[in-house]
Amino acid sequence: MQVMGNIREIFISNVRKEAKRRGIKIKQLADLAGVSQSGLYKIMQKNREPGFDTVEILAEALGVTPESLLVDPLKRTLNRPPSVEEALSILTEFVRQTKMTK
């Protein structure tokens, strides 16, 4: 169960990060994705598990791959050097998590 909890937290964090990066509020994301606002709020508040279809729909609305919403950016392994944007994103997330643990 702990693994699912971690995946859910990573998913929620990544959805928030991508929405913020695009200047989209959660309400707007729900509208863009064609999902109910109440359902998305329940997912974001950890009161509902997202289904595979929801992950795909939200990823499409955010313009990212479903996999990118499920992978911890600090543990991601790339077969190529990260782009400047990816490196900054990873570094920003690392700094944020470091500040939260102090």
Image (cartoon, rainbow, N blue to C red):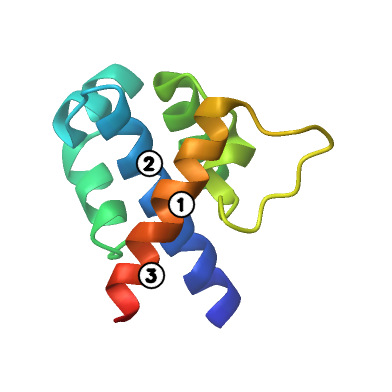
Q: Which residue shows up at 52% across the image and 42% down it?
A: 69
| Circle 3 crowding by C-alpha within 10 Å: few under 14, some 14–19, many from 20 | few
Give coordinates of residue 3: x percent, y percent.
Answer: 59, 75
* Precedes in sequence: disc 2 or disc 3: 2
Element under disc 1: helix
Determine the secondary structure under disc 3: helix
Distance, label 2 to label 3, CA atoms, is: 20 Å
Q: Is residue 49 visible?
A: no
* Residue 75 visible somewhere in the drawing: yes
Q: Quadrant of residue 36?
A: top left
Q: Is residue 4 above or below residue 56?
A: below
- Tell which of 3 and 39 is nearer to you: 3
Spatial CA distance of label 1 from label 3 is 19 Å
Count of marks placed on residues: 3
Residue sticking out furthest to the right: 79
* SS for dot 2: helix
> Where is mark 1, residue-wise?
11
Identify the residue at horizontal 24%, vertical 55% (top origin). 42
Q: Amino acid at mark 2?
A: Val
Q: Is residue 82 above or below residue 46?
A: above
Mark 2 touching mark 1, by CB under 8 A? yes
Q: Which tag, 1 or 3, sits closer to the chain's start? A: 1
The amino acid pointed to by label 1 is Phe
The mark lying in front, picked from 1 and 3, is 3
The amino acid on which the numbered mark 3 sits, given as a three-letter code, is Thr
| Residue at the spot of label 3 | 98
Q: Residues within 10 Å of mark 1 (few under 14, many from 20)?
A: many
Q: Which residue is mark 2?
A: 15
| Residue 82's disc number | none
